[in-house]
Amino acid sequence: MVKNNNVEWEKEPLENFLDEHVLYRGIHKNYLINWSDFNKIPPNVFSYKKDEKGISTDWSKYATPQFTLSHLRNPDLKDNGILEINVGNLKETIKGYNLPLIIEHNPLKLNRAHTLIIGINTKNKAKNRRHLSKISKWAKGFDPKF
Amino acid sequence: MTTIKEALISILKDLPDDITLNEILKLIRDKWQLSKSKRKVDKKINDKTVISLKSKFKSEIEKVHKGIARLKDNWDSKGSKGFDNEIWNKVSKLLREILFYLWENMIEVPIPAILPCSDGSIDINWETEKFELLVNIPPDNQELVNIYGEKPGHKEDEIEVRIKFDLVKPVIIEWLRIIM
């Protein structure tokens, strides 16, 4: 739903996130400086600063890996990779491991796809980041090229 | 597994007269932990391998340090926090003590990945066939260290704790001794 000259998007409920949907996240190459196995995703890519509410991702309903890459400060695969998390796998992992994670649509004026994964805090970050890394993979054709 | 009561009985019968309460408590704790961890460690690695592992550790840690040290503020282009020598020294010393202790006790544990986090903390990350362990060391000494570990197929061995930095070394060593 569009409001006010295309600048405010309606926040959509969790049930709109279908199992076949995907969440994309841009990863700067510096997260991988000490990581040798690019077939796996390390857990540090799901760290975030204290002033952030959650882990920023883009919802495939309104985004593609190219869209996510293009929204990065330096939109180049020489500096970034784009990972993806299948929504069905995420829901299953949350349920299976009883994780306190919530998928929350958080549209921004210039990014209707913006979605947060919230629930990670100082008490549970190791376990939650570990499980998120296990269900993540590089988006096809958007693995880091550095 | 020996219960605390059994450990207590076995210790009390041989106590010297001048022992202090703290010393008794330590004896009980050690005795109980000794049994719990079933310390019949297989001789999995020999002395030559230990020397080789230590040498590898030194070169690896230097390489990793170079990578981490060059990460200044905003290293991910999104306002991430850089790393100073204080947290690096803390992490490298901890890791050296844990690994050297385990190797000297013939427990072969690989050198983990040391990874930067955007909040200025550092992840120590093991992903092996036998176990997975993630230790997050915060930059602030007042903050607690977050640890999560699991052994595939052994739910009972899962560990998730938040502890003071001083306790990280004994907790990790003990957990690894139990699950290896």
Image (cartoon, rainbow, N blue to C red):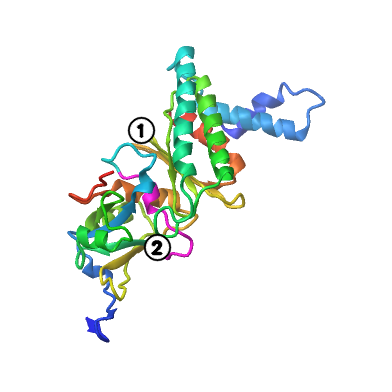
Task: Work out whether residue B28 or residue A53 is closer to the camera in this orientation and state it.
Answer: A53
* Residue segment shown in magenta: A41-53
Q: Nearer the viewer, residue B47 or B121?
A: B121
Number of the label disc, if any, that sits on residue B170: none
Q: Is residue B107 visible?
A: no
Near mark 1 (Cα within 10 A), the count class, few <14, some 14-19 or many ≥20, is few
Residue found 27% across the figure and 69% down from its top: A14
Mark 1, residue position: B128
Q: Residue B33: which quarter of the image?
A: top right
How far across and down, in percent of the image, does residue B77 sit?
39, 57
Residue position marked by numbered label 2 in the rendering = A54
* Residue B108 can be seen, yes or no: yes
Where residue B42 appears, as percent x and y from the top left, is: 44, 17
Chain letter behind tag 1: B
Q: Residue at x 53, y 39 (%)?
A: B91
Q: Main secondary structure of the magenta part?
A: loop
- Residue B13 position in % (x across, y down): 71, 23
Q: Are marks 1 and 2 in contact (CB under 8 Å)?
A: no
